[in-house]
Image: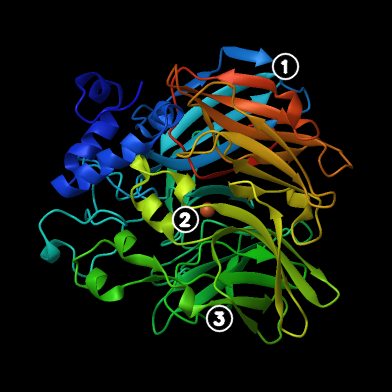
Amino acid sequence: MTFSPTSNADAAAYPGMARYLESLAPGERRRAAERLDRLGDADHHSLGVSEPQPVEHDYRVEQIDGSIPAALSGTLYRNGPGRWEDHTGRPLHHLFDGDGMVSAFTIGDGTVRYRNRYVRTRHYLGRTGTRHLGTNAAGGWRKNIGRLPPNLANTNIVEHAGHLYALWEGGPPHELDPVTLQTRGVRRFGGRLRWLGSYSAHPSLCPRSGEMFNFGVEFIPRPHLRIYRTDVRGRLRHFRSAALPYVAMVHDFALTERYLVFLVSPIIPDAVPVALGLKPLGDALSYRPERGSVFILVPRDGGAIRRVESEAVLQFHLSNAYDEAGDVVVDAITYRDGGLLDGIARFRTSALGDAPSEFSRFRITASGRVTREPLSDSACEFPRHHGGYEGRPHRYAYVSSRRRLSTVYDSITKIDLVDNAEVTHTVQDEGNSFCEPVFTPRPNATAEDDGWLLTVEYQAAQHTSRLVILDARDLGRGPIATASLTHHIPQGFHGNFSPGRR
Ligand SMILES: [Fe+2]
């Protein structure tokens, strides 16, 4: 079976895709159909993972296969667009657009409860304009000029100091009730998140101090990183700012015991057509390798900020980082060219395989040199590791990877960074896919990989999703337990596990 834009049966099976194609201008629709034609059968089966999930559920999962570990107790929270449409049903084109829908898998005593709720952002409630990252509002430039994309709260979900936050990098977090997932409101930390209130979707939690570090990209009076630390009682303060070399998208950072580590990629918008309302920002972003990259090392406890220029690196996600005898080591998922930017702007019909990624280790020496070595050439994304090793050397990284599909990720890979070895678990059925793997340690474990990987598998044939629990020490064994939902969850971005009973 392959998706045909002109087939009524396919339009019924994939209504979101059909509405999306219908919304395109004729030339763009023809190019989208050509891209669909180039996808293989398995990729066509996988397309349902981008269909919307309009229903909010709350139920105990009946179908458990295998045995959920008795010691696994807590809630896996995940976030991602639940629909790539606004409240009027108008399709949104960019992967990063779409209202945030939070899922909670609450695990305990061998049972699983599932809940999902849309974050009640002003956008979800229909109270904002309709100019999005990848889709301009209807009505031409007059309806778009000077308008910013709305806060969609769709990228990550993090619990800190008893508060649960749905995050989106261009604005402040939305706080949710950790049990009911009801939206408590926008959180500006007593007014300390000022102006745009940009607050990245990738805060880092220091396992030693319990602090949460994060940053936002601000552009006034000039492009800079505004860096925050939040103490164990949840009190946020701005503690540093660092100038950016150019207007750039910065998505993530890493933490060592001494530094916050930023790697600035030259993902640069063509500002004039965006400012004039002629193009959405997502269509105006381009990779400009001639501008180079810069590592910005911000000391956690005072001292001068270090800047080290390097050849251009295209990345969204850093993995772990650590200090080693005056050097700083940081791992990242990098891309060979800017094809990724075009792919995510047209994600419904694009092949990720057109934008190859690799896992790389960078070393910034005390003398200001940058070296790079490959860690894996598996096509991968969403790097995770044991949170207790944040900021110090770790042995194992866990990533989503691709073996058969080119549209989404169909495998989970464990990378042994010491022995240079990999183990991969791939979905069994054609068209199925995995989201990011979240590691959670077994209580009282001493070995770094003694714990579980929690991920969600989309099952294409049934158009449903299931929680998959893997033994992190033995991925090759396949799932030790699954909890099958009665519906699907659209492909999401990031999540985290909060241990303990709810
Ligand atoms: Fe991310």
Q: Marks 1/2: CA distance?
A: 36 Å
Up the image or down, 246 lies above or below 346; here it is: below
Q: Residue at x 45, y 65 (%)?
A: 198
- Give the class, few, some or many, for how many residues have Cα within 10 Å of label 1's Cα (few <14, many ≥20): some
Q: Which residue is mark 2?
A: 173
Q: Which residue is mark 1?
A: 67
Disc on res. 20: none
* Label 1 or label 3, whichever comes before in sequence order: 1
The reply, left or right, for residue 229 in relation to residue 135 is right
Q: Quadrant of residue 21?
A: top left
From the image, state whether disc 1 or disc 2 is nearer to you.
1
Q: Residue at x 78, y 82 (%)?
A: 366
Up the image or down, 289 lies above or below 59; here it is: below
Q: Marks 2/3: CA distance?
A: 22 Å
Q: Which residue is mark 3?
A: 242
Q: Position of residue 116 (x, y in %)?
A: 46, 31
Question: In front: 6, or 79?
Answer: 6
Q: Residue at x 40, y 77 (%)?
A: 219
Amino acid type indicated by mark 2: Pro
Query: Mark 2 near ligand 1 (CB under 8 Å)?
Result: no
Q: Is residue 416 visible?
A: yes
Q: Is residue 177 visible?
A: no
Query: Mark 1 near ligand 1 (CB under 8 Å)?
Result: no
- Give the class, few, some or many, for how many residues have Cα within 10 Å of label 3's Cα (few <14, many ≥20): some
